[in-house]
Amino acid sequence: MVEDLPKKCPTMVTGGTGVCGRRHNSHPLLRFFQDDRVDAGTMRRMTSWPDKPAGDLNATLARVFGYSGFRSGQQAIIEDLVAGRDAFVLMPTGGGKSLCYQIPALHRAGVGIVVSPLISLMKDQVDALQANAVRAAFYNSSLGTDAAREVLARLHAHELDLLYISPERLIGGGFLERLADIDIALFAIDEAHCVSQWGHDFRREYAQLGMLRQQFPAVPMVALTATADAQTRADIVRVLQLQEAPQHISGFDRPNIRYTVLEKHKPLDQLLRFLDRHEGQAGIVYA
C-alpha cells in the first residue's frame, strides 16, 4: 500500500524528510509528481507494492505461520518495527527471532532486506516462507547467473516481501545503489554478533553495515543475535548506530534442554537403555 502523498514534495526524488513533514524512500519515478501531466492515481499504480495485510498482527501470525499466539517478547519487537522504530534483539536459539522481522516485513510497504551469513539457513527460511505463500527469495553466491538475474528482476518489479542476502552481496557489486530505487520495509541484521571483533564469528563485511544508517536513515533496522556478551552488544549498537533503539533481551534458560555427560561403558547397552527411558521424545546423542 502506498499512502497519499502531496503532489509536489521536492525531497521525494532523493528520499528523506519532505517539506510535507513525512519521510519518503527515494524512487526515480517519484520525480513525475512534479509534473502536472501525471496524476497521483497514475503514480500510485506505477510504484505501489501489492496490498499487504493491515492491522491485526495476530491474524497474520495465525494465517501465514499457523501459530495461535506470540512467544514472550516477540510482539513488542514486531510492534516497534511495524511502527518504523529500530530494535536490538538478544534472544536464544529457537526463541522465534525470525518472526520478529518476517511479520513486520509483511505489514510494511516494500521489501524486507535480511542480512545473513548462513547460506544454508537462508535457503531453509526461504523454502519455509514460500511454502506459506510468502514472496521470499535469497541472493547469495550459491545462485547461478540466470537465477541471480531472476531474483534481481523480481526485486525491481516489487514482487518480493522478503529478500535474504549475504553481507558480501549487499556491500559489493553495486547492490546498495540498486536499493536506492526500491521501497524498503526494513533491514534485519541476523547473527549481528558478526559485527564485533570481540565476537567469535567476526565478519569484515558485517563491520561495514553501519553505512546502511547513513544511506537509508528512514528505514527501520533490527539487529538480532542469540549470543552476545556485554562487549559484543555494545559493539553491535555502536557499529549499526542503534543507540536509540529499544533493547529486547530474553533470558537463556531453556528448561527443555539438558546436557548429560556419561563415561563410556558398553556403549551399545548404554544407548539402548537411554532410548528406552526416552521413548517418544526428541534428543541428540553425541558419541
Image (tube, helix red, strand yellow):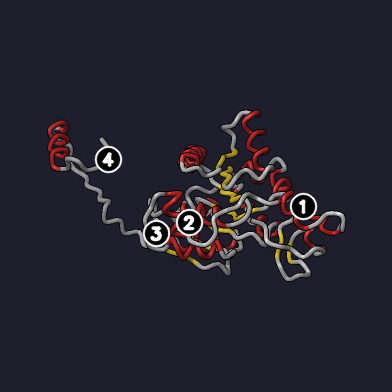
Residue sitting nearer the eye, 144 or 284: 144
Classed neighbour count for the residue bearing mark 3: other residues with Cα under 10 Å, few (<14), some (14–19), many (≥20): some
Kindly identify which residue carries mark 2: 100
Q: Earlier in the sequence, mark 4 or mark 3?
A: 3
> Which amino acid type is shown beneath numbered disc 2?
Cys
Q: Earlier in the sequence, mark 2 or mark 1?
A: 1
Inspect this view and state whether residue 70 appears.
yes
> What is the spatial separation of the Cα atoms under label 2 and label 3, in whole angstroms?
10 Å
> What is the spatial separation of the Cα atoms under label 4 and label 3, in whole angstroms?
27 Å
> Which amino acid type is shown beneath numbered disc 1?
Thr
Q: Are marks 2 and 1 in contact (CB under 8 Å)?
A: no
> Which amino acid type is shown beneath numbered disc 3?
Phe
Q: Nearer the viewer, mark 4 or mark 2?
A: 2
Classed neighbour count for the residue bearing mark 4: other residues with Cα under 10 Å, few (<14), some (14–19), many (≥20): few
Q: Nearer the viewer, mark 4 or mark 3?
A: 3
Q: Earlier in the sequence, mark 4 or mark 2?
A: 2
* Secondary structure of the residue carrying numbered label 1: helix
> What is the spatial separation of the Cα atoms under label 4 and label 1, in whole angstroms?
58 Å
Q: Which quarter shows the N terminus?
A: bottom right
Kindly identify which residue carries mark 1: 42
Q: Position of residue 63 (x, y in %)?
A: 44, 51
**Height in image: 198 above or below 281?**
below
Kindly identify which residue carries mark 4: 284
Q: Nearer the viewer, mark 4 or mark 1?
A: 1
Q: Nearer the viewer, mark 1 or mark 3?
A: 1
Kindly identify which residue carries mark 3: 70
